[in-house]
Amino acid sequence: MDRRTWAQDVLRCHLCETPNPPMYCDICLIHLCKACVGEHLSDESLEHRVVAFKNRKFSPECSKHSKKLCELYCELCGIPICVQCISSDEHLGHKQVEILKTLEIKKEVLQRDLLELERSIHPKYQDIASNIPVQKANLNENSKILTTALDKHGEDLHKEIDIAIQKLKSDMNEMESKHLAVLDKQEHEIKCSISEIEQSIADLKKLLNSNDISLLSAYKSKNAEFRRLPPKLTFSLPHFTPQKNNKEQIYQQIGSLSALSIKTEEHGYTLDSPGAESSPPNKPLFDEPLIIADINTEYGESNTLRSVSCLGDDDVWTFGGDNMMRLYNLHSKLVKSIQAKSGKIPEDVAVTQSGELVYTDPDDRTVNIVKNTQIQTVIRIQGWFPLFICVTSSGDLLVVMIRDDEIQAKVVPDNKAGAVVVVNKVGKFRFTYTGPPSTTKGSFNPVGITTDSQSQILTTDSNNHRIHILDQDGQFLHYINNCHLQFPYGICVNSKDNLFVAEPTTGV
């Protein structure tokens, strides 16, 4: 629905299309005239709750404009809005959808979370919990075997070794207690998690029966937390190594128990990704990319926008063809400007985990960090020019550098070859992506590259005005080519998986 004309659209009865129906079914989410209420209630296969239109539950009152009902939902701000909100500058350029559609989307999210908890996460936790009694039984059986071996060896020795044997038994019991304590602790934690999952299931079922948009909007999924399954404990059970009897060296000949070894594997248990069974490998993860907001900057044809780097969820650092780095918010407001220390054009920018701007300056061969408004040089390089930069999840800086003679590079972007080259964290080659199978040689022109929370790889194909999305193994998933992109260049992704794209000539 066009948000400029939605207020003039006439509501009609769902059954007979009579205009301006005064009644509404909160369960079925349809409009009804008084004449059709009886017919609607006669369908006993479904539950119904018919109320006056003004009392319907999915349109809350506007928090800013008294007695105004919210008929739309601002996707960027994440709040219901009324017609007066739309006319204000606060939501200018934001994507707005009918609140009924938002309600349906929210319920779809709840339904997906509920299904994942019921069908995948909860059963997996139960399987893990059921394995702990087996581990306890193995532990007990192993202890019995050790006890028998120790007793037999003790009978073969003289009275003098009784104290030593008793000490070994005591050591064994202590290790068993520690072992058992670890298992008891994990069992308790898993049972607590199962209780939380079961409570989440109950809460989700309750929310699914509610049409209160405020409650639904306030819902925060815990599924990501529950997907992080308990660490797998791998025990190296102690064993007894007997020695031949030698009264002169009795303690040495008794033998010893191996040390208690408890290994924690954070990813020892695995959980299939949601939808893995029902979704084909190349199915798009969303039906259609949507432009949430256009950030209009002062860049353009005379000063092309080259790169972007996210600062939190609402701000983005930019730079182009001059010596200034500019911070914009989602409302196109210039928040801050920083001039490069050398007065020359930076080559690339990134943002640290603590929110500080770092940039490379090939002119004076430095990597710099901006703390408050002070620029500090982190690295000054001899014989190399620093080019591109990124910050790893561990907080390290990765810098692409080229030597003075431009023959050797420490990290080489394969733009001219039309390929994305991926290596693992120790630099071992994993794969090369040159475009989907139908791509002709030389037509793929990768420039900017980033990843999202699902470890998907996104790279701009500038000359073809689109973005390629790959899975973490380099398999092509789909394009973003429906947003009228013009020579997309630098890109970044914030914590909400919103994608920011720099267009050099438009400055957006």
Image (tube, grey):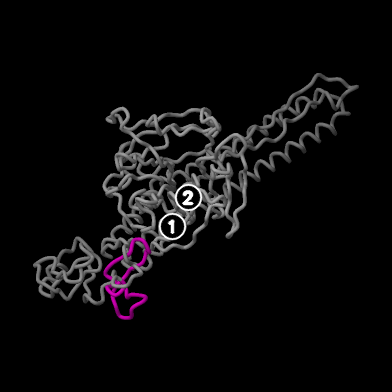
Q: Which stretch is magenta?
A: 60-85
Observer able to see residue 468 = no
Q: Is residue 152 above or below residue 338?
A: above
Which amino acid type corresponds to the residue marked 1 in the rendered image?
Ser
Q: Position of residue 213 (x, y in %)?
A: 34, 67
Q: Secondary structure at mark 1?
A: helix
- Choose mark 1 or mark 2, whichever is in front: 2
- 88 sits to left or right of 229: left
| Mark 2 element type | helix
Comparing 267 with 127, the one in front is 267
Quadrant in which the N terminus appears: bottom left
Residue 21 sits inside the magenta stretch: no
**Disc 1, disc 2: CB below 8 Å?**
yes
Q: Amino acid at mark 2?
A: Phe
Left-right relation of 301 to 172 = left
Q: Residue at x 10, y 67 (%)?
A: 17
Magenta segment, principal secondary structure?
A: loop
Instruction: Looking at the picture, tell me which residue is in the foreground, 177 or 7.
Output: 7
Q: Which residue is mark 1?
A: 200
Quarter where residue 95 is shown: bottom left
Q: Which mark is residue 226?
A: 2
